[in-house]
Amino acid sequence: MNKKLLSLYGLKWNPFAPDVPVEALHPTPRIESFCWRVEQLAGEGGFALVTGDPGTGKSVTLRILAERLSAQRDVKVGVLTRPQAGLADFYREMGDLFGVELHPHNRWGGSKVLRDRWQTHIDAALSRPVLIVDEAQEMLLPVLAELRLLSSTRLDSHILLTVVLAGDGRLVERFRSDELLPLGSRMRVRLALERASAEELQECLKHALAKAGAAKLMTPELVATLCDHAQGNHRALMNMAGELLAVAAQREARQIDEKLFLETFAPPAPPGAKAAGRRR
């Protein structure tokens, strides 16, 4: 959204875009609790898990968590950007994230260099490096197994890394398989996100508008209507609100109300109804 459209409503940013600042995200009490527990886990190492259907807030939770961990002194946070990669690219990205040169064809050497780097960090900072993986249901079985084995030493008694995995229901199902049961059993902190209530969605929407600098951009009636139609899905809510904002800006409407919602999202009348209306 360009500056002209933002200035029309006095907005600091588009409150419904995916790339809003972290300060504009709404942390629920459950997300606050999860982030606090992972912050404690970073001192000991281990695995944490965020699960939920698409649009329930997994990526938002990870953004909030990454920001809070990065603000802590001496905490190193890496975000894996290609969860679907094979082992060779997995090692390449791990080397890039943690500042070591790895040779993917020599996995033994790569694992040794990574573990030495993590141990050096632990000795200096008394905290484990943190690896965050979104869309973890896309990770290949060999990569998940390698990550589990890579993150600990001394017969699994010394943890070198804190890993936060996030994924949908497919990830939960995979952890029930014989191959991944050893990894699933290592999840020390869990957050299962569910569809939000209409009241929770209203809180989220009002928070987004207030942080963007236009708390009264939408009428209370429209806020309630949007949250009812979103059916508990944060992403659906923001997509509808973003479309309404674009339509309102095109029309230079001063406030977004239910009338605009009905004009934008009302289903088109069937052809027969139009013809009957013309005859009358």
Image: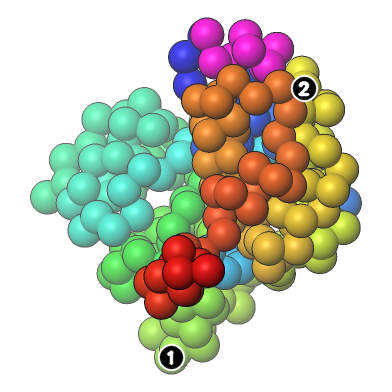
Image location (x, y in percent) of residue 3: 52, 9
Q: Which residue is mark 2?
A: 214
Image location (x, y in percent) of residue 195: 70, 68
Q: Residue at x 53, y 69 (%)?
A: 280
Q: Do the CB atoms of the residues marked 2 and 1 lie less than 8 Å apart?
A: no
Q: Nearer the viewer, mark 2 or mark 1?
A: 2
Q: Is residue 269 visible?
A: no
Asked whether residue 140 is drawn in magenta, I would say no
**Quadrant assignment, res 16:** top right
Q: Which residue is mark 1?
A: 178
What amino acid is found at the position of numbered circle 1 in the picture? Answer: Asp
**Quadrant assignment, res 209:** top right
> How busy is the neighbourhood of tag 1: few (under 14 within 10 Å), some, or many (20 plus)?
few
Start-end of magenta stretch: 4-11
Q: Is residue 29 visible?
A: yes
**Mark 1: which secondary structure?**
loop
What amino acid is found at the position of numbered circle 2 in the picture? Answer: Ala
How many angstroms separate mark 2 from mark 1 (CA)? 52 Å
Q: Residue at x 49, y 84 (%)?
A: 173
Q: Residue at x 18, y 51 (%)?
A: 88
Please, is residue 80 above or below residue 272 in the view?
Answer: above
Which mark sits nearer the N-terminus, 2 or 1? 1
Please, is residue 92 above or below residue 34 in the view?
Answer: above
Viewer-proximal residue, 23 or 229? 229
